[in-house]
Image: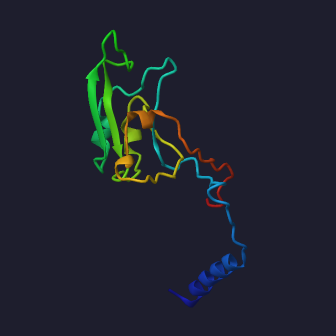
Amino acid sequence: MSVQDSIKGFGVTFKQFLKSPETIDYPDQKTPVWPRFRGRHRLWLHDNGLEKCVGCSLCAAACPADCIRVVAEENTAENRVSAGERYAKIYEINMLRCIFCGYCEVACPFDAITLEAEYELSEPSRIAEIYDKDMLLAPSPKPVPIRTEPSGRQ
């Protein structure tokens, strides 16, 4: 590392030092996240009310942290839950083990699971960190704004 590189680095630090800090009134005002941010998981329904998840377990197979558990059951004429032959009777994600890689989202052929922008995921107990199917089907209880301005990076 040359002296010129060191001076250049100190220049960047000095410019940041002169900027005034940006203070956000958290939790009343939340920090906007970028559109590609991966936060809380969400399961989706079709427009007709049927679940998109057909219990294929591809998301669980793709998960490197082994935090997804899917137990499939057959649809019947009396109890039609999803559009496919099967549905996920049990769908659980252990959020304490999840590394938010997004592989479950990529592996799903039906776009049944997505990772949304919510980042407030703390719970009062460890057992509450295991999200069940009802929690995953519900909309985000703490919506987060999405950042729209372009980044300064190229």
User: In terms of depth relative to the viewer, which is nearer, 19 or 139?
Assistant: 139
Q: Seen in the image, is 144 located left or right of residue 113?
A: right
User: In terms of depth relative to the viewer, which is nearer, 153 or 23?
Assistant: 23
For the point 34% across and 14% down, which residue is it?
79
Q: How many marks?
A: 0
Q: Seen in the image, is 41 located left or right of residue 67?
A: right
Residue ranking furthest to the bottom: 3
User: In terms of depth relative to the viewer, which is nearer, 136 or 54?
Assistant: 136
Image x and y of residue 8, in percent:
62, 82
For the point 35% across and 53% down, which residue is it?
126
Image x and y of residue 35, in percent:
57, 47
User: In terms of depth relative to the viewer, which is nearer, 26 or 10?
Assistant: 26
Image x and y of residue 80, in percent:
36, 15
Q: Which color mode does the image show?
A: rainbow
- Does residue 123 sit above or below 71 in this rendering? below
Image x and y of residue 116, in percent:
51, 43
For the point 63% across and 47% down, which residue is it?
145
For the point 44% across and 20% down, which residue is it?
50
Locate the C terminus by quadrant: bottom right
Quadrant position of residue 92? top left
Residue ranking furthest to the top: 77
